[in-house]
Image: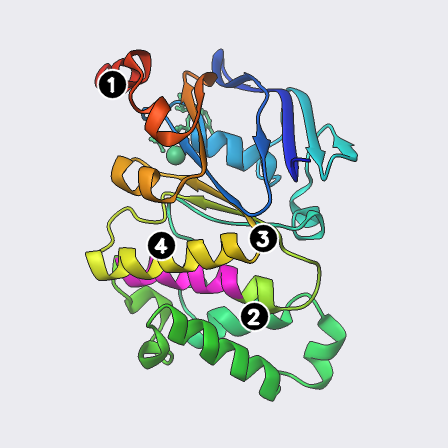
Amino acid sequence: MPILQTKHLTKHFDGVYAVNKLSINFEAGKITGIIGPNGSGKSTLINTLTGMIPIDSGEIIVAGAERLQRVEAHEVASYGMTRTFQDVRLFEQMPVIDNILVVLTERSIWKALFEKHGAFHLEKAEEVLKKVGLWEKRNELAKNLSYGQRKLLEIARVLAMIHCGVGDINIIFLDEPFAGLFPEMIKIVTVVMKELRDQGKAVILIEHNMDLIRELSDHIYVLDSGELLAEGKPGDVLARKDVIEAYLGE
Ligand SMILES: Nc1ncnc2c1ncn2[C@@H]1O[C@H](COP(=O)(O)OP(=O)(O)OP(=O)(O)O)[C@@H](O)[C@H]1O
Ligand SMILES: [Mg+2]
């Protein structure tokens, strides 16, 4: 059974249907790729699923059971979802390590009050920062990191969410996590994604680099003007003439 489904999901902005009657499924233990030309509705889809913007109509179904007219932003973690942003969002004025510690502690307020940043939190912060190669940068302010390092810090925050022990994060949306990364950084993110998949998480990848989509995705959806143009295995879908034309027609 899919861990997350949309049924006829629709969102328009001033007459532009950013997402139009979209019915798609996301599976646990799989990487689902979402591709499509610029403006085809990929980010809007994630924004609706993570409560950033309300939907106009349709349904969001979590774990086959809960049917939602919309997801509220403050409930996203309780539905097991987390995300990264196409335009990286961090606590810019905080050191790298604090960007992780706030995630590790923010959900258990009482614990945070009484045992602020205990040994467990510091250990987890070290673990996730080492994973993405940012441990050496732990005392730098987030705003002083390079663009690629900032994107890696967002990935580390996702890993911290999974470790924070409150809620059970099992759906992870990554909106163009590879854009602007150097090859060695791309390698780090691909390893993280494969590990998350192997842990049984549903990983949703928005990406324009088709080599990465081919390498990582178990299943892909192609959006065009907010509608579903094609779906299936990357090898099959990326060979389709209408899919190639949708991209070339940008
Ligand atoms: N907040 C908004 N207000 C008005 N229009 C919006 C808003 N967000 C998105 N749109 C419009 O909705 C459509 C889909 O945009 P969206 O950002 O979802 O595309 P995308 O597939 O993520 O594109 P890209 O590959 O460039 O990131 C576009 O026409 C865009 O201009
Ligand atoms: Mg986008």
Which is in the foreground here, disc 4 or disc 2?
4
Residue 221 location, quadrant: top left
Q: Residue at label 1?
A: 250
Q: Is mark 1 within 8 Å of ligand 1?
A: no
Q: Rounded to the nearest whole Å, what is the CA distance between mark 4 and mark 3? A: 16 Å
Q: Is residue 159 above or below residue 115?
A: above
Residue drawn at x 28%, y 68% is 144
Q: Earlier in the sequence, mark 2 or mark 1?
A: 2
- Mark 3 vs 1: CB contact within 8 A: no
Which is in the foreground here, disc 4 or disc 3?
3
The image shows residue 140 at horizontal and vertical percentages of 33, 76
Q: Earlier in the sequence, mark 3 or mark 1?
A: 3
Which label belongs to residue 190?
4
Question: Given the image, on which type of amino acid does mark 3 rest?
Answer: Gly
Which label belongs to residue 47?
none
Question: Given the image, on which type of amino acid does mark 1 rest?
Answer: Glu
Q: Rounded to the nearest whole Å, what is the CA distance between mark 3 and mark 2? A: 25 Å
Residue drawn at x 36%, y 78% is 135
Q: Nearer the viewer, residue 32 or 77?
A: 32
Q: Is mark 3 within 8 Å of ligand 2?
A: no
* Magenta part of the chain: 148-159
Answer left or right for 181 relative to 62: left
Which is in the foreground here, disc 2 or disc 1?
1
Give the main secondary structure, helix, strand or loop, of the magenta stretch.
helix
Which is in the foreground here, disc 3 or disc 1?
3
Q: Is residue 230 visible?
A: yes
Residue drawn at x 56%, y 70% is 102
Answer left or right for 204 relative to 105: left
Q: Rounded to the nearest whole Å, what is the CA distance between mark 4 and mark 2? A: 25 Å
Q: Nearer the viewer, residue 210 or 94?
A: 210
Q: Rounded to the nearest whole Å, what is the CA distance between mark 3 and mark 1? A: 35 Å
Q: Label 3: how many residues lie within 10 Å, few (<14), some (14-19) or many (20+)?
A: some
